[in-house]
Amino acid sequence: MKPGIYEGLSNEAYHAGPGVSKSQLDDIAVNPAIYLWRKHAPVDTDKTAALDMGSALHCMLLEPEQFDKRFIVAPSFNRRTSQGKADEAAFLNETRIRNMTVMDAEQGRKLQLMRESVLAHHAARFFLEAEGPCESSMYWSDPETEELCRIRPDKYLTGRPVIVDVKKVSDMARFARHIGEFRYHVQAAMYCEGFYHCFGTYPQFVFIAVSESIDCGRYPVRVYELHDDDMSAGSTLFRRDLSTFHACRLSNNWGGVEIIQRPVWAR
């Protein structure tokens, strides 16, 4: 894969292809052996088939024209009758053949309300409706390590240098904590670095955070930009983890043994 921007590359092809991603650097940060384990460990597809509301929300907000091709709301079936059971089995078999994800009525209703809540936020609506491609794949060669790096922004704007990232959160009050827990500051720093190598300028990086928990009858929506201190910390961690990946790849020594301690309350 040569450095550059690839439109239309499927999500499956992106994740299966070359280059190191932010999620892989998350594994490196835990232990380099986790990176190799995740690449080779088998996946229980029966456990990954359930609806991911985050994926459904991303599709509805960023690629609405694809939503009805990937997701479907199940009708009500009378499971107390043989005909109802047969109709449900036929419906599920059809959706399985068409590779569609099934939502129940409540999930579909909630998802529509979350979408409308996002569009009611002035800044969120502006970023979502502004001109720019969604789910593009960007590749660049890191100047320090010569490692091929890759990112897949939810959206970037063509009229101004902005990357937009949609996050579903369980509770908006926890989003600041999630930045550290899920290393969103590393994501922002790495994505801005990749954007720079593809376009020659550093972008603004904004999060559209959408809560799936009700607050006074509404699903809260906020638009955030990280503080400069957090962006700097994320950049430092990105460089550290990429250097670790580079050293492990060259030496083919990926570690594997981790230190664990009893919890503080047990000492």
Image (cartoon, rainbow, N blue to C red):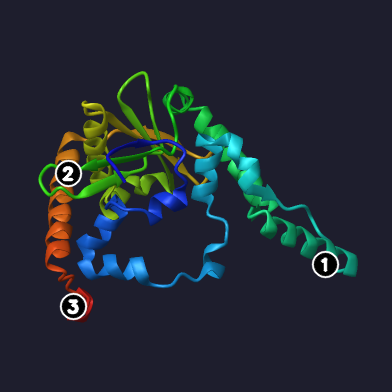
Is 8 situated above or below 174?
A: above
Q: Is mark 3 on a helix, strand or loop?
A: loop
- Crowdedness near tag 3: few (<14), some (14–19) or many (≥20) residues, C-alpha within 10 Å: few
Give the total number of marks visible in the rendering: 3
183 or 221: which is nearer to us? 183
Whichever of callouts 2 and 1 sits on the residue coming sooner in the sequence is 1
114 or 30: which is nearer to us? 30
Residue at (36, 70) in percent of width and height: 40
The location of residue 106, given as percent across then percent down, is 66, 50
Task: Name the residue that disc number 2 marks.
Answer: 142
Say whether marks 2 and 3 touch (CB < 8 Å): no
**Is residue 217 in view?**
no
Residue at (57, 62) in percent of width and height: 49
Instruction: Give me the disc on residue 21.
Output: none
- Crowdedness near tag 1: few (<14), some (14–19) or many (≥20) residues, C-alpha within 10 Å: some
Q: Which amino acid does label 2 sit on?
A: Asp
Q: Which amino acid does label 1 sit on?
A: Lys
Is 243 situated above or below 139?
A: below
The location of residue 139, given as percent across then percent down, is 29, 41
Q: Distance between the residues labelled 2 and 1?
A: 56 Å
Q: What residue type is labelled 3?
A: Val
Position of residue 184 in the picture relative to residue 81 (left or right): left
Residue at (47, 46) in percent of width and height: 10
Task: Name the residue that disc number 3 marks.
Answer: 257
Task: Name the residue that disc number 1 marks.
Answer: 85
- Crowdedness near tag 2: few (<14), some (14–19) or many (≥20) residues, C-alpha within 10 Å: some
Mark 2 or 1: in front is: 2
The location of residue 191, given as percent across then percent down, is 27, 39
Quadrant housing residue 96:
bottom right
Whichever of callouts 3 and 1 sits on the residue coming sooner in the sequence is 1
Residue located farthest toward the front when viewing the structure as drawn: 2
Mark 2 or 3: in front is: 2
